[in-house]
Image: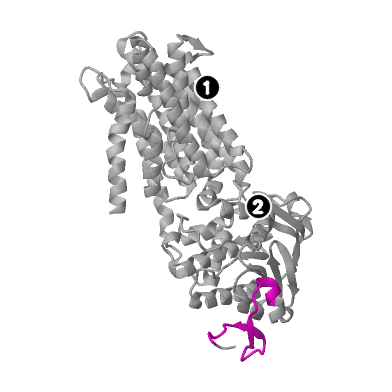
Amino acid sequence: MSGEKRPAAFLAFFALVFVAVLLAAPFTGRETIRPGEIFGPEGTPRFFIFWTLRVPRLLVGLLAGASLSLAGLAFQTLFRNPLATPFTLGVSSGAAFGAALAVTAGLRGTFVGIDATALAAFAGALLVVFFLYGLSRRGGGMSTLHLLLAGVAVSYFFSALLLFMQYKADFTETYRVVRWLMGRLESIGYAGSLTILPAFVVGAIVLFFYRRELDLLATGDEIAQSRGVPVNAVRVRLFLAASFLTATSVAACGPIGFVGLVVPHVLRMLLGLSHGPLVMGSVLVGGPFLVVCDAIARNAVPESELPVGIVTALLGGPFFLWLVVRRCG
Amino acid sequence: MLRIESLSFARGGRAILRGVSLSVAGGEFVALLGPNGAGKSTLLKHAAGVLPAPIGTIFLDGTDRARLSPREAARIVAYVPQGREPDIPYRAREIVAQARYPFLSTWRPAAREDRERVERALDRVGIKAFADRVFSTLSGGEQQKVLLAAALAQDARLLLVDEPTTFLDPHFQEEIFHVLSDVRRRENLALLVATHEVNRALLAADRIVALRDGEVVREGAPGTIASAEALEAIYGVRFLLARHPNTDRLLIVPRAEGSA
């Protein structure tokens, strides 16, 4: 039973890192802000930078990072496949297609406080989710492998549509779409956080509530069913929770890659395969991971900001490769 | 304990079970015989709830399985799948601990008695030594024992065991059947075991039910099955029988090539 203590120690460490990032991130950057400056007077540039630019950026980073990590964790377990992520399942490309459609159709402004592009992205993601859900309910139900393959096919289909639209669109539109596709945490304000927050709260609760069921699903469907898990019902609820987590994050921030793949895998190596600690770890690590990537994106290149999606993939890719190779060797 | 009433099942237009009826009493050891494709595994999966059974066909303790929640049913029957699930990523002890699921909830997390039950199950099957090893690194016989220990930890009163010795060498075959008899006696369990080990079934079971092409073709005490005629009805082959040196029971022996 020596393995029992390790997850607790790691989780305590992750919680410390989480708090450290929460406290440090809004004060650091090109402009260092002292704690005294955040209480006003209102109207000073630093007051504005802190409350209008950095705090919303931090919040949306924490929420999107945690949501994408949770979604990746759930998808990987549900499909019993380490490659299942919001991206491989086509949910992200559905969202990207929706966003591109909104941009090229000239949809602008906001609706109930949410950006029109984000709403269109959300609609695109849901379209894919319900298409896959419908496929999975067809007849005797599809095997998870076939569902995963269907997701990959959907993903290619929407990517092709996206390319077609960019080919037909003018230069400004194309630039806006491409920029959206790179993922961003900046200039989406508090509305971005509000877009993600409900799905994050519900999704995190659902995943934690079903942590034992997730363990049994990772063991195998037949064993899970024979132990008393209503497999189909639980699967549907988890699938919808993970899909909403993905759809809202992508809608608010664009398709930020690699978080949903890397974070759950690293957590499994550190915490083991029990989903109770894994769900908590996804929230505690996924958020700060994205915020730190964003901080690097802001400061890596002088006089310009990199899109955060580029940083997550540039950092996450080689790191992940190193982990995988080290494990096999 | 378990009563199955005229259960039929078809998949892809092919009938796999045709009106099968069968019952297992509390504490009874029933062996399920039959050639490959006779429907043994499918029958066990229906009883285990892995395949949904039609209303009015499967009764656990007199209650229709379809009216029991999966958790309630899991407290009555436990299922031991064929020990050939190489990609379970968990350690042996974790797999056994997961079997406490029907007794746990958000409001009732695993308590000391659950952990003690897990250790007792590991002990009973004799796998404490490798309880911390990952399932996929264990041998076939060890994997089978882990799945059996998990079923014990589930605290059910009937174990549904699907071909527990198919991929095992003679040593493990002997051992698995020994463990099955042992746990059955000590924990007063009922067993429904699908197997191709005809001789072991004839020696150890209280009763034998034989399926062929989705129908029950023979049923009765081992003595009534141990005849060339009955076994031919089941397997379609004329076997040579000889008496066991200790028990005087008739068992199958291989024919010597070239002899009459």
Instruction: Based on the picture, tell me whether residue B233 belongs to the magenta stretch.
Output: yes
- Residue A250 vertical position relative to residue A232 in the rendered view, above or below: above
User: For mark 1, does the 10 Å Cα neighbourhood hold few (<14), some (14 to 19), or many (20 or more) residues?
Assistant: many
Q: Residue at x 50, y 23 (%)?
A: A124
Q: Which residues are magenta?
A: B231-258
On residue A238, the disc is: none
The quarter of the image holding the C terminus of chain A is bottom left
Q: Residue at x 70, y 49 (%)?
A: B69
Mark 2 falls within which chain? B
Q: Are marks 2 and 1 in contact (CB under 8 Å)?
A: no
- The amino acid sitting under disc 1 is Ala
Instruction: Based on the picture, tell me whether residue A169 belongs to the magenta stretch.
Output: no
The residue lying toward the viewer, choosing from A161 and B58, is: A161
Element at label 2? loop
- Residue B161 vertical position relative to residue A77 in the rendered view, above or below: below
Q: CA distance from mark 2 to mark 1?
A: 36 Å
Whether residue B132 appears in this view of the structure is yes
Q: Which residue is mark 2?
A: B51
Q: Which residue is mark 1?
A: A123
Q: Residue at x 22, y 23 (%)?
A: A301
Residue B154 screen position, x and y as percent: 61, 60
The quarter of the image holding the N terminus of chain A is bottom left
- The amino acid sitting under disc 2 is Leu
Task: Tell me: B113 left or right of B70.
Answer: left
- Callouts 2 and 1 in the same chain: no
Q: Furthest-left residue in view?
A: A302
